[in-house]
Image: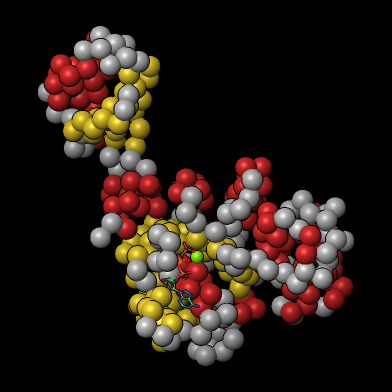
Amino acid sequence: MALVEVRGLRKTFGPVVAVADVSFAIEAGRCTVLLGPNGAGKSTVLNMLAGLLAPTSGAIRFEGVPAGADHRHLIGYLPQQVAPFGWMTGFEYVRMAGELAGLDRGAAGVRAEELLALLGLEKAAGRRTGGYSGGMKQRLGLCQALVHRPRLLMLDEPVSGLDPVGRRDVLELLRRLKTGSTILFSTHVLPDAEELSDDVLIIRSGSIVVDESLASLRARHEQPVIEVELDDEAGLPAWLERLATTGAAVERNGAVIRCRFASAAATHAGAAEVYRLAADHPGGVRRVELGQASLEDMFLKAVQP
Ligand SMILES: Nc1ncnc2c1ncn2[C@@H]1O[C@H](COP(=O)(O)OP(=O)(O)OP(=O)(O)O)[C@@H](O)[C@H]1O
Ligand SMILES: [Mg+2]
């Protein structure tokens, strides 16, 4: 079986259906991203997997764990809001997390030191976490999630609240962790999702609407785009008419003109014509670029009702 199998998971809060009916599997060694608009149910799904929230119905099965038995020690979880006990030091907090996960005090301490250093918190390790900034709490949360070398690492928006340097550090860490671990993370940052994930789950209003590998999503939605950025709009209307004769669907967004063709082959044939027309534009062009539809384009299609 897969490392984790989720079947018919549902969670209601009184009249609110947070998660309607969610099923998916996570294969060992893969990195899966959970995407979805605000309020779609991502955190609720992760909280149920982590054992912090009891499902209203449905089942979560972990490989090698009998049905109904506790699997929490196999999971490391960075929740969306990290709230460590403010009176504990960073070191004490991570060591305690290790002990709760079954490590003895000595091993938990060694591992805590190692992780605090890895995440750039060695100087703050002896300080009370009540005085940590949001970004520091986020890194502390990552140490806590990794302390017992979990089989599944789950991260709910791991880069939210981090400054650009912190964000780059965390992404770099995840890139390194990807080899040899199984990761499930949620994010709103689609370029990060595209860079890190092997598999994509998109949840909308509590139901999964996309469950596919990134490679196959890309292959299905692959649509080359030629972007022309204009220097000046002189003579634009007549020029746009000529552009339309290339067979491209033409979209304009300010000075940027996007030309989409129906297929890669059509783009190949049309590109030369677009480049020729670009050279001919009376107002001049700043940039002509051949690109691909991004995960963002696919995401917007998937979450629109
Ligand atoms: N404890 C709760 N009580 C009542 N409603 C809740 C509770 N937790 C979540 N919900 C509702 O369930 C739905 C899903 O919430 P959830 O936090 O899982 O969304 P999310 O996808 O993580 O959103 P975000 O991207 O904003 O983090 C929302 O409508 C939310 O208001
Ligand atoms: Mg959330």
Image quarter in which the C terminus is found = bottom left
Image quarter in which the N terminus is found = bottom left
Placement of 55 over or under 259, stated as above or below: below
At 45% from the left and 76% from the top, the residue drawn is 5
Q: Nearer the viewer, residue 258 or 87?
A: 87
Q: Quadrant of residue 235?
A: top left
Residue 210 visible? The answer is yes
Q: Quadrant of residue 268?
A: top left
Residue 102 in the image, given as x and y percentages of width and height: 74, 80
The image's colour scheme reads: secondary structure
Residue 152 in the image, given as x and y percentages of width and height: 58, 69
Q: Nearer the viewer, residue 132 or 9?
A: 132
Compared across the picture, whether 127 is left or right of 73 comes to right
At 55% from the left and 84% from the top, the residue drawn is 65
Which residue appears farthest toward the bottom when viewing the image? 68
At 61% from the left and 65% from the top, the residue drawn is 81
Residue 241 in the image, given as x and y percentages of width and height: 14, 21
Compared across the picture, whether 223 is left or right of 10 comes to left
Compared across the picture, whether 229 is left or right of 137 comes to left
Placement of 191 over or under 278, stated as above or below: below
Compared across the picture, whether 252 is left or right of 167 comes to left
Residue 181 in the image, given as x and y percentages of width and height: 59, 62
Q: Nearer the viewer, residue 266 or 294?
A: 294
Placement of 190 over or under 79, stated as above or below: above
Q: Quadrant of residue 302?
A: bottom left
At 85% from the left and 52% from the top, the residue drawn is 123
